[in-house]
Structure formats: structure tokens, C-alpha cells
Image: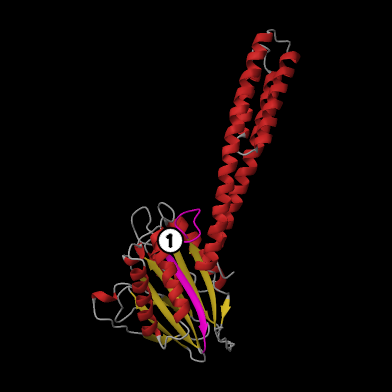
């Protein structure tokens, strides 16, 4: 597994399908239950009058024709029960049948409205899936000399993308990685993230080094803001880490633009890669002299580097304590790399007092030691 992000969505889809199945079965179950109760209770107990709820329940999950069918069936069973139980009163039966008919017609209208909204939602979801594949495409499980294992969860349960972003590209002689977090939430954050991703994809291949790449990201945001001054992107900043893993060398280079320090695992030892001179967040370079310091550190076969956003490190429990990521990373030091994103996701969900209320992105980078295949951009 290289992308743990879609797994929560699959679980959500499975839970939704289960709920829909139960919802579709509920009117039938209630129908049989009411008929059975009516047959075993005294004739004076008019349980058959409760059949009115059957078409109303069907409207929640059944189609218009199905809702109408359940209503007609309820009317027929009420008439049968009146005859079998020898209940007097044609007027009473007519009133009961008329009431079920009225509820059935209203329920069919509700079903039609619901069906229309579900169709619209399906179309919007399909568009969101396409946007996700374009804006936040999952990284390959292996690229050059590294394995990549991703966890991505948007704060909104039904959302596909948020303000956290990531990208990995293989350039001649190295692999370059970007992971970051846009300030704020909503569509403005998604817009800013998409701009940064576009700039990274277009400049990562020819930028001579990480400082030049960081400068081009800043320039890209500035140009976009000038092109569309009313856009939220003009006012938002983003923290990010840029990583370069050269081929044939057991080292890694990292440039930190105001982002949480990644965790480096060598054997069972886990330590943060703190920046001696962190750069300003992207889109804030104009507030001070632009100066980028690159950290270079050993990163050999079997070493793992965990990049993450503050949605991970700033998750709080009921007492307000921050999530102990470094402690958890040590606990999972011996766990297979492909399992770490799922372990992290489950632990975060259990630790957070109110669940995950922020976007979460984490990328585990593993040096494999294999000889990379040279790939040139088209």
C-alpha cells in the first residue's frame, strides 16, 4: 500500500452502502412486523393503522416507483387485515386507505426530490475525484531510489482535497519532494495549494538546487496574485519542506520553509531534522531578505524520513495535549513501512478529542538502496 489516504474513503463508502442497505430493508421489515403484531393482538387493537409509516420510511432510500409500490402494498394489506380480523366499518377502512394514499403520494414526491439531489451529488463527487487526480495525484509506490507511503485525509468527511499538498518528481540524478500546508481552510486554501503544485511540477526539473526551487515557488505565488489580485491566494501563505535525494549518494538535502521538522529514522533511533536557519513560509519572502539554508544529512538504505503537516502534530486529546508523534514513530520503528500510514491514521483518530478536525498529510520516504532507473521528463 503506498497511499493510505483513499482507505478511509473506502471505509466511509462501505459504511454508507451498509446504511443504505439497512434503510432499504427497513420498510419491508416494519411492514411484516406490523402485520404480525396485528394478527397476534386482539382485534380491537388497530395495529394496522400504523401501516401509514411504511411509504414514509421507503421515501428515504427507495425510488419513486418503489415508494409508490410500498404504499400500495400497505393499502392492500390493511384491507386484508380488516377483512381477516372481521373489523366493521367501511367508512373507517376508507379513511385509513385514504390516509395511506395521501402519505404515499407525499412520500413519492420526497423520494423524487431526494433522488434528484443524490444524482447531483454523484456528479459533483465525480468532478471532485477528477480534481483530486489532477491536483493531488497519489505518488507512485516507488520512484528512483525511494519507496513512498502516503497518508492523506481531508478535514471534511466528504472532501477529496484540502489545504495540505504534496508532490514527488524524479529528475535526472535525484528525486525531489515537496510537502506543505496552506494557511487557513476552504476553497482559498485549495486554490493556493494548486498554484504551488503547478509551479513545483513545472520548475522542479530545471531548478539548479532547492533554494532556487523555493524562490520559484514564491515567484509563482506572486505572479498568480498579480494575475488575479482578488484571489485568496494573494493573501495566503504556506509552510513547506523541500527534499532532494540524490542518486548514488546516501544523503538527503532538506529546505524547511516554516514547516514542522520531519522525523528521521535510522535503525530504531528517531530524531527530528531541525533546521539551523529555517526559511520564511512561502509567500512571505518579501517580509525579509530571502535566504535559504539547506540541511544535508546521512540517509542510507533502510533509513526512513517522515514528512507531515500540522494536522498530525497539532492533534489534541481531551486534556489539550498535542499528539506525541516522535514517541509513536519510535514505537513503530520496526513496523513495515507500508503499514505506518495506516497505523498513524488509526492512532490519530483515536487520540483526537473530536476526531480529525484538520487536514492530515504524511509521507513516509524510505531509501531502498536499489540502483535507480534514469527518467527524463517529456
Residue 322: quadrant of the picture: bottom left
Whether 106 is drawn above or below 263: the answer is: above
Residue at left 46%, top 69%? 362
Residue 170 locus on image (x, y percent) = 52, 82
Residue reaching furthest to the top: 88
Q: Does the segment drawn in magenta span residue 166?
A: yes
Q: Which residues are magenta?
A: 154-172
Q: Can residue 19 be seen in this snapshot?
A: yes
Residue 195 locus on image (x, y percent) = 42, 70
Whether 70 is drawn above or below 175: the answer is: above
Q: In the displayed structure, does residue 122 sit left or right of residue 41?
A: left
Q: Which residue is mark 1?
A: 359
Residue 347 locus on image (x, y percent) = 47, 60
**Of residues 147 and 73, which is closer to you in this image?**
73
Residue 327: quadrant of the picture: bottom left
Residue reaching furthest to the bottom: 248
Amino acid at each position: 500500500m503506498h497511499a493510505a489516504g483513499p482507505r478511509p474513503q473506502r471505509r466511509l463508502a462501505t459504511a454508507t452502502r451498509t446504511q443504505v442497505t439497512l434503510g432499504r430493508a427497513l420498510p419491508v421489515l416494519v411492514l411484516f412486523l406490523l402485520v404480525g403484531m396485528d394478527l397476534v393482538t386482539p382485534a380491537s387493537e388497530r395495529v394496522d393503522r400504523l401501516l401509514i409509516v411504511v411509504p414514509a420510511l421507503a421515501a428515504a432510500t427507495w425510488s419513486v416507483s418503489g415508494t409508490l409500490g410500498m404504499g400500495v402494498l400497505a393499502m392492500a394489506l390493511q384491507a386484508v387485515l380488516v377483512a381477516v380480523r372481521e373489523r366493521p366499518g367501511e367508512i373507517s377502512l376508507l379513511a385509513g386507505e385514504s390516509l395511506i394514499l395521501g402519505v404515499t403520494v407525499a412520500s413519492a414526491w420526497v423520494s423524487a426530490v431526494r433522488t434528484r439531489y443524490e444524482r447531483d451529488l454523484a456528479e459533483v463527487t465525480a468532478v471532485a475525484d477528477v480534481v483530486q487526480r489532477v491536483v493531488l495525484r497519489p505518488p507512485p509506490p516507488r520512484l528512483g531510489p525511494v519507496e513512498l507511503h502516503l497518508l492523506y485525509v481531508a478535514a471534511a468527511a466528504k472532501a477529496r482535497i484540502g489545504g495540505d499538498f504534496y508532490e514527488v518528481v524524479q529528475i535526472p540524478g535525484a528525486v525531489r519532494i515537496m510537502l506543505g500546508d496552506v494557511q487557513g481552510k476552504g476553497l482559498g486554501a485549495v486554490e493556493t495549494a494548486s498554484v504551488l503544485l503547478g509551479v513545483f511540477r513545472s520548475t522542479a526539473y530545471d531548478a539548479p538546487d532547492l533554494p532556487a526551487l523555493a524562490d520559484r515557488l514564491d515567484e509563482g505565488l506572486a505572479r498568480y496574485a498579480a494575475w488575479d489580485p482578488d484571489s485568496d491566494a494573494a493573501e495566503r501563505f504556506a509552510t513547506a519542506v523541500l527534499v532532494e535525494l540524490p542518486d548514488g549518494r546516501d544523503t538527503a538535502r532538506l529546505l524547511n520553509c516554516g514547516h514542522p521538522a520531519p522525523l528521521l529514522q535510522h535503525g530504531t533511533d528517531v530524531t527530528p531534522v531541525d533546521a539551523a536557519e529555517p526559511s520564511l513560509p512561502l509567500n512571505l519572502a518579501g517580509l525579509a531578505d530571502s535566504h535559504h539554508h539547506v540541511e544535508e544529512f546521512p540517509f542510507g538504505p533502510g533509513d526512513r524520513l517522515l514528512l507531515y503537516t500540522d494536522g498530525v502534530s497539532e492533534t489534541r486529546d481531551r486534556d489539550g495535549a498535542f499528539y506525541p508523534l516522535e514517541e509513536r514513530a519510535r514505537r513503530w520503528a520496526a513496523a513495515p513501512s507500508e503499514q505506518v500510514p495506516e497505523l498513524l491514521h488509526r492512532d490519530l483518530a483515536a487520540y483526537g478529542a473530536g476526531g480529525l478536525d484538520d487536514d492530515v498529510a504524511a509521507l513516509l520516504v524510505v531509501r531502498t538502496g536499489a540502483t535507480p532507473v534514469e527518467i527524463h521528463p517529456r
